[in-house]
Image: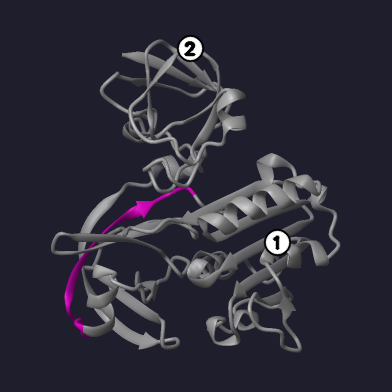
Amino acid sequence: MHKVTLSNGVEFMCSEAQTILEAAKISNVAIEHSCRTGRCGICAAPISRGETRLVGSEESLSDHDSSSGKILTCSRTPLTDIHLDINDLGEIGSLKTLTLPCRIDSIRAYNDDVLSLVLRLPPNSNFNFLPGQYLNLIRGDIRRSYSIANAQRADGKLELQVKRVEQGSMSAILFSQVKENDLLRVEGPLGTFSYRDDGEQNVILMATGTGVAPIKALLESFSSDFGRKNIFVVWGGRYKKDLYLNVESILENITYVPVLSRDNQQGFFHGYVQQAVLSLDLDLVKSSVYACGSEVMIKDARECLLNNGLPLKRFYSDAFVSSN
């Protein structure tokens, strides 16, 4: 067993048979992560002391990240005691991951390509989560990840927003086979995407496609008197029909910027979400960004916004990686 020490002094033990991320989870220590497969890059961490061994994929690490000493905690195991230049995430570590049966409470179409799926858990399930986290939906031997699209509700119900995926096994089931009251299972909560108060002036929530689901959950958790912070929602799709939610009805006093990449219509920013953020002419040094959507968008937005003054530690993301 080797000791893993974080910058804020938190420690946990990890064997050479575990990844660093697995060991942290077992010790109820939450560190940044999402996909757990090496593809999203969210668990990247600078290592300042010690040696590790690669046991999985690090495809999301750039050559610059690797040469500067970063590793993926989901893909590495320690060979010695190590020190990582990251902090733990506090209360997320105390949330228990549960596997529970659930019933489909309702199904409705947002549009031809996106469903709202509301799930009903057994009474007294104590399924606690932070807005922004995701779960695995399970039907037989098929398991797919979906963000929880609501904040914690008094009735305990969970909404998922499901995109139709060509040749997608779970997508085909949900769009054409299931009905209300059918039995499924969920595993969660998972991931570390959630709001952290960094004392910022501007909170920028940006998404593409169904990446708006965790953004909706965050908005529901913000009170209307959310300090003196300015909240911006920048949501992009290819065409107008892709922007299926009435974002401005979720929370008052936000600035909403709808973005279309392949259509040019009045009232919409034409281009990409990161360009739309820059068009707001905000002081990014005083901002935090929460980005959800495709791996490509996350990578491009991160590079663009950091180059324009956003502090590295204030770019939070949840990359949606394909299961196919």
10 Å crowding of disc 2: few (<14), some (14-19), many (20+)? few
Against 76, residue 255 (above or below) is below
Magenta stretch encompasses residue 182? yes
- How far apart, in angstroms, are the residues tagged by discs 2 and 1? 37 Å
Along the polypeptide, which appears first: circle 2 or circle 1? 2
**Which quadrant would residue 122 be assigned to in this image?**
bottom left
Which element carries disc 2, helix, strand or loop? loop
Q: Which of marks 2 and 1 is in front?
A: 1
10 Å crowding of disc 1: few (<14), some (14-19), many (20+)? many
**Which quadrant would residue 255 be assigned to in this image?**
bottom right
Type of the residue with mark 2: Gly
User: Residue at the location (39% across, 87% down)?
Assistant: 109
Q: Can residue 196 be seen here? A: no
Q: Can residue 285 be seen here? A: yes
Residue 240 in percent (x, y) is at: 60, 86
Quadrant that contains the C terminus: bottom left
Residue corresponding to mark 1? 274
User: Residue at the location (43% across, 11% down)?
Assistant: 81
Compare residues 197 and 318 and report the one nearer the observer: 318
Quadrant that contains the N terminus: top left
User: Residue at the location (29% across, 26% down)?
Assistant: 18
Q: What stretch is highlighted in magenta?
A: 177-192
Type of the residue with mark 1: Gln
Residue 205 in percent (x, y) is at: 64, 63
Residue 50 image label: 2
Against 187, residue 157 (above or below) is below
